Each structure stands twice: as structure tokens, then as C-alpha cells.
Image (tube, grey):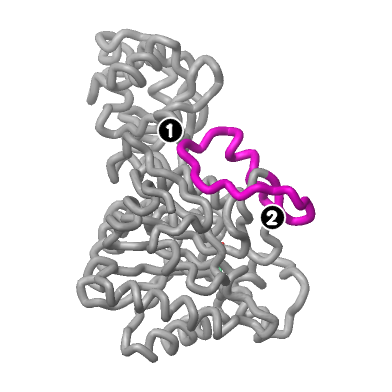
Amino acid sequence: MSQTRKQIVSNVRKALIKIGTGVLAGTDGLDLSIVEQLVDEMVELRAGGMQIVIVTSGAIASGKHRMGITGKLKSMPQKQACAAIGQGRLMRIYSNAFGRHSVYVAQILLTMSDLTDRARYINIRNTLSTLMDWNIVPIINENDTVSVDEIKFGDNDHLAAMIANVIRADILINLTNTEGLFDRNPVGKQRARLIKIVHEITDEIESMATAEADPVGMGGMRSKVIAARKVTACGIPYIIARGKTKGILADVFAGKEKGTLFLPSAEPMTSREYWIAFTLRSRGKLILDDGAKNAIVTQGKSLLPSGITKVEGDFEVGDPVICIGTDGKAFAKGLVNYGSKDLVKIQGLKTAKIMQVLGYKDYDEVIHRDNMAVAKGSRKT
Ligand code: GLU
């Protein structure tokens, strides 16, 4: 048993558990016995004083089953319709399973745009914390009915990563249908080795995760590793483990080396930095010279117009944009004080010239440091 594991799990007071379709789906729609097995374990953890929040998939799978559809769904509206059919059943199964222990649940359906709007974000956070204060188990899924590309999380791995930050979880456990992250695709190739611990999410680690390793779920291992990058960046440990394994949660919380543990970043982002970096969709790009990049990355400075060599995209004041270095790599993201049309006019100029060129100067900085998230080590914006 590793000491690191033990230390991490023994500090957990609030756990976010993500349960994938691959775990819940049985031959007959949703597998009731698995839900009961996991719920019993979660109830046990709660009895030990832990708060539990769930992000669950399975609505589409359940709806498909109800409609007798076996193959792939052909269109987005079909997926949305299946989710609408299946969500009620999904909740009923959880509600009944927790009800056996007189524990009550609450349903929360979210889209990405609910989290990008700061006021809604706060409302979600307040609702979740009230539910937890009341000892209710919040059960979250994407609001598939209204989710189209622009406002979609894409997969519940991403949704769970965002929620981990909203509730400031002490750990995110992503239960899936494989044992964890393998050094190669375990389906078909025999000598795949389970990675027990990941200290830093390097490109090599990312390349071990293929998108299609999970035939039943949505995101595959790739989206789980991308989620790991986000979760660990905000200082939260993340474990990918096999949800169908009996006693998996008990084992994980006993510190046993189950699944893959991704260690949290030593320099975690603040909640606001995280919101800027991962929740907001960027509207444009600023290409910066080496001096500007250096000032931002190593000296903690704001971005001034003089360091900008190119402006890409059409964006307004307050929009999130990505900062790119001369090597073509993104290294920061922030909210701009000037729209793209004005930025094109002042790029490369000294701050003193802003007034002269634009006829106004609301700010010296193009992006103030307080409105910026900078990639450090394993972070990617
Ligand atoms: N929201 C979808 C469902 O409940 C799942 C999306 C996902 O697993 O990534 O079926």
C-alpha cells in the first residue's frame, strides 16, 4: 500500500464520483445491481463523515433501451430524445438505491453555458452547497436536451472536471469500465501495464490514452486524461478506476493501489484562474513576442499592447482569448480589456500611445494579471 495514496485519501472530506455509461450499462438497459453496489459503498463512506456528489452518465443508454434501439443513434436530436427518456429512469434507480438507506438525492442538469455565466455559476455553487449541508446527495448530468456544440460539455468527464472545481472537491474518482490508464490500449494487446501513479501529465501520458478504448461510454480514456489535466491543475487528486469491481470505492479509500492516481499540481490554480482557463471558451488568439511571454510566465506581469505581434479572431471587451508564444504554443488565457478591432490598432505600441491612437484609454493592460490563467508545468489552457 503506498503512503502517498493513504495520505491523499485520508484527507478526503468531499468526494466527487463520476460514473460512466460503461459502468452502468447492462444487457438489460441500466444494471440495477451495479448501481446498488456503488450506492451501498457511497452510503458507507457517508457514514464515515464523507460528503458525496455524483456525476453520472447513463441517460442516453437507458433511453435507447426503452426505445429498443440497439445500434448507434443517428443524430443529435435522437441522442437528446433518448437522454430525455432515460434521465427519469436513471434518477429513479439512484433514488431507490439510496432510499434503501433513507438517503435522499437531488437531480441537477447542467450545460456548459450555465457554468460560463458567472451569476449562474454562483447559483449552482450555492445550490450544491445547500444540498450538501442538508445531507442530500446531488446527482449531476449534462442537460442533453438543450446541449448543442456551443454550450455542450462534450462528455461527462469534462463536466465532472468542472464540477470538481465548483464544489472544491478533495478528490475526483472517475469510475469507468477499465482498471485505469494503461501504457497502451489493453483491448487486444496483452502486455499492457496499468499505470498506478501519474506525477505529471506529459505528452507521453496523453498519448497512452486513446479515444476509442471505451466502446460503450462517450469520451474514452482520452477524455478522462484531458479531464485529469484540468482537475489536477486546480490541486485536486484524480483517480480513474474500474466501477464494476466490487468494493472499488472502499478499496480506493482504504488507500489500496486500485486504478490510476493522478497527483494534484503542486502549484494549484485559484478557482477564478481555473474558471478562466477551462470553463470559458476562447474567442480569439494573441500572438506575443518572447519578452511579453517571459514577463507573464516568469515575472507574473500583465499583458501590455507592446508585446502583441498578431491578433486573431473577432472578440469584444471582456472576452476570453488565448496567448500564444513565438513557438506556436498556448501558454495563457485571459479576459481582454480591448476588443479585437481596437487591439489591431494598438498591437506592438507603447501604452502611452493608446490614447493617441484610439482616442480613449480605459486600461494600460490588454489583459490584467488578475484576469489571466497561466500554464505552468502540466497545465494546458
Ligand atoms: N449525458 C450523457 C448520458 O447521460 C452521457 C455523456 C457522457 O457519458 O459523456 O447519457
Magenta stretch, overall SS: loop
Mark sitting earlier along the chain (2/1): 2
Q: Mark 1 points at which residue?
A: 321
Looking at the image, which is closer to me, 344 or 229?
Answer: 229
SS category of the residue bearing label 1? strand
| Magenta region includes residue 203 | yes
Of discs 2 and 1, which sits in the foreground? 2
User: Would you place residue 236 above or below residue 288 in this image?
Assistant: below
Residue that appears at 29% across and 14% down: 354
Label 1 CB-ligand 1 distance < 8 A? no
Q: Disc 2 and disc 1: Cα gap in Å?
A: 33 Å
Based on the displayed image, in which of its 4 quarters is residue 273 positioned? Answer: top left
Q: Does the magenta portion include 209? A: yes
Horizontal and vertical percent position of residue 369 = 27, 27
Q: Which residue is disc 2 drawn over?
A: 213
Amino acid type for the residue under numbered disc 1: Val
Residue at point 55% right, 21% down?
328
Picture coordinates of residue 150, whole percent (x, y): 52, 52
Residue at figure coordinates x 28%, y 77% from the top left: 47
Q: In this view, does 75 lie to the left or right of 261?
A: right
